[in-house]
Image (spheres, rainbow, N blue to C red):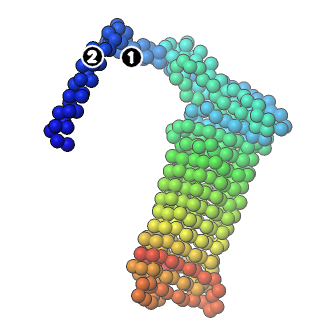
Amino acid sequence: MGRRELLIIVGFFAVGSLLYWWTAPPATESSRFSLGRLVDEIRADIRRDSSDTTFTHAGTIALSGSVAEVRLSGVTGDVLVTGEDRADIAFELLVHSTGPDEATAVEYAKSTALVEDDLGGTLGLRVSYPPEGRQRTEIVMRVPSRLGLRVETQSSSNTSVISDLRAVRLEGTVGETTLERIAGEVSGSHRNGRLTVTGAGSVSLTLQQSRATFADVTGGLALNATRGETRIVGSGGAIEIEQANNELRIEEHDGAIRVSGSGGQVEIVGPRREVEVDVRRAEVEVVLARAVGVTVITTDEPLRLVLEGQPAITLDAVIAGSGEIDAGDVGLTATRGQDQTSLTHAFADPAPTRVVLRNRRDDIVIRKR
């Protein structure tokens, strides 16, 4: 920009400022800035929340036989829900409330309520808050174990513990969440915190920045995991995982395993059924103790096959482009061609179970555990 253009811009700015000064309405008393008024407003706001107290609402809710699910929303703090052999719902809603004095804070807390909404086969339970003060709530519920639960939490500082129910759906749940002994499906989504599921019929979840552990899931898992950590141990049924920049570890799983996506790490230890991993730019390690069909495809990161004992397999390993096949630990040497490196070997005769390893632009390592 030249000097002439800069002078033109400055001139326009100066003219605009003068026009505003001539045409703007005169400042009123209320529009003038006052440091004293600002201090008074701050003091008034502090006085409005100068007291803090708690109040507990407790009661029971009758249920008809047609209700199959409870939908819980609006709780801003911890959630504890336990399934029992019972016909109604018992609850305790703990309210923390502020106010200008203790008596008013108690009134605000009492005005906070658990509101019921009959949705037919679903009973909606929502926490309603007064406009005054600031409230934080925690809830303890004992419900019939035949019910499913749909729960929504909003704060990463929450702790949710849910157990002994027919099914659970997490609606964008945030924070530390523990689910135990869920007879049917665990579904929905979780983000930004630790998730632990111990004992479930099946799992279908979307995970974002979750540190998730699943154990004793009998009917398989379907996961979409992004930028987190996922561990599956001692479970069964088919696994289907789509992941991005996620660290995945699967241990001693009795079911087919299929993993796709890009980035992160994949570690599969002691699979008992077929394994298929098709990823990009992800480090992969498979620890194999038995003859299980395995296909692993990755790029730009190392791929490792670790043999525990002597599984009766036929190895078929190929690297396209740069990279090396290191199999010295098992006494094998790869063949290098013009644009690929390959290694084929049967560890038993016959060995119909194939282990197929493919990498591009990085190494394949075969070693003993």
**Identity of the amino acid at label 2?**
Trp
> Residue at 61% across / 32% down in the picture?
74
Q: On the image, numbered disc 2 is attached to which residue?
A: 21
Residue situated furthest bottom in the rendering: 349
Give the quadrant of residue 76.
top right
Which quarter of the rendering shows the N terminus?
top left
From the viewer's side, name the closer residue of 39 and 328: 39
Q: How many numbered discs, if any?
A: 2
**Identity of the amino acid at label 1?**
Ile
Residue 326 visible at all: no
Task: Decide: is 354 above or below 29.
Answer: below
Q: State the SS at label 2.
A: helix
Q: On the image, numbered disc 1 is attached to which residue?
A: 42
Nearest-to-viewer mark from 1 and 2? 2
Crowd band around label 1 with a 10 angstrom C-alpha radius: few (<14), some (14–19), many (20+): few
Residue 136, image x and y in percent? 55, 28
Residue 331, image x and y in percent? 46, 89
Residue 344, image x and y in percent? 53, 88
Crowd band around label 2 with a 10 angstrom C-alpha radius: few (<14), some (14–19), many (20+): few
Judged left or right of residue 39, residue 121 is right
Give the quadrant of residue 273.
bottom right
Residue situated furthest right in the rendering: 65
From the viewer's side, name the closer residue of 95 and 4: 4
